[in-house]
Image (cartoon, helix red, strand yellow):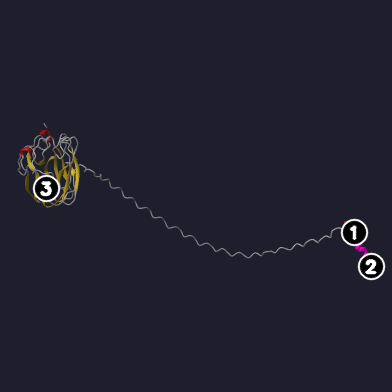
Amino acid sequence: MKKASFISIFSVVSVLGYGVPSLAAVINFDDQGFLGPNAFEFAGDAQTLNITTNVGNVRFSGGVILTNATNTPANPSTAYGTANNTANAGIPNNPTRQNPLTIEFENPIQNFFLDVFNGLPVSQGLEYTVADDIGNSAKFVLASNLQGGFQKIGFAAAGRKVTVTADTTPGAAFPFDDGIYGFLIDNVSFNTTLPDDLLTPVGAVPSLPTPEPIPEPEPIPEPEPIPEPEPIPEPEPVPIPFPTPTPEPPTSIPEPGGVVGLLTVGAIALLKKKH
């Protein structure tokens, strides 16, 4: 029956924060003496719980107490949970039950963790968001309750209020109706040290090992100074020789010939006769 499968074999994780105050507190609902029915349809309206701890009062709201919830081998004890009406999950609606569940603290806390039980036999993991009232939040995927897994998830919570919210976007809880949710919480602890085996939040980048420091390079020695070059002496002036003029050859008298030559010879003969 789908009614039974809704709360059978819950998937569980633990949600944690960081920092270690001097006082630690753990709230286990069995130790508080709470008792309730074994299914949401018999639980009635939401119950507000006020619990006194060694670091102040803690208030739970939005859910109901279930004891030995049907088919929950992961936690057969008392837990605090919420669920809404879904036709194919067989859970009657009660508008006083809320998503998210809210946990309020009298004094600011650090290092918050709790067990979260996914109550849906979804075909894939279902996302849950844990947030505080000063802006810190983290998302985690819990396996289907049919897988019966138990894991721890880490969250850096602080402030005075923490909420746990199931994803109800369309298709998130397929094959169930859009908007379905159903989960329980237990073993609420804060101001404690984180365990090592935490589930990595959605989108978180795993921390890398710190690289070894790069050694300082050895200093480069100062270069030896370059000596000043000796001055280059001025060159002695070189006399420029002037060229000796070459004498032109004498003009040759052309040999007499032809008519001009005869006339010249005749003229010379006449001059000789006069003398």
- Label 1 element class: helix
List x then y, in percent, for residue 216: 35, 53
Farthest right residue in view: 273
Residue 221 in the magenta stretch? The answer is no
Amino acid tagged 1: Leu
The residues bearing labels 2 and 3 have C-alpha atoms spaced at a distance of 166 Å
Amino acid tagged 2: Lys
Amino acid tagged 3: Ile
* Mark 1 crowdedness (10 Å alpha carbons): few <14, some 14-19, many ≥20: few
List x then y, in percent, for residue 182: 12, 39
Tell me the mark number nearer the camera, choosing from 1 and 3: 1
Magenta: main secondary structure equals helix
Residue range in magenta is 263-272
Give above or below for 34 relative to 56: above
- The disc, 1 or 3, on the residue closer to the chain's N-terminal end is 3
List x then y, in percent, for residue 100: 13, 45
Q: Using the image as rendered, state which of residue 159 and residue 221 is in the foreground.
A: 159
Q: Which mark is residue 274?
A: 2
The residue that mark 1 highlights is 262
List x then y, in percent, for residue 218: 38, 53
Quadrant of the image containing the N terminus: top left
Q: Which mark is residue 103?
A: 3
The residues bearing labels 2 and 1 have C-alpha atoms spaced at a distance of 19 Å
The residues bearing labels 1 and 3 have C-alpha atoms spaced at a distance of 155 Å
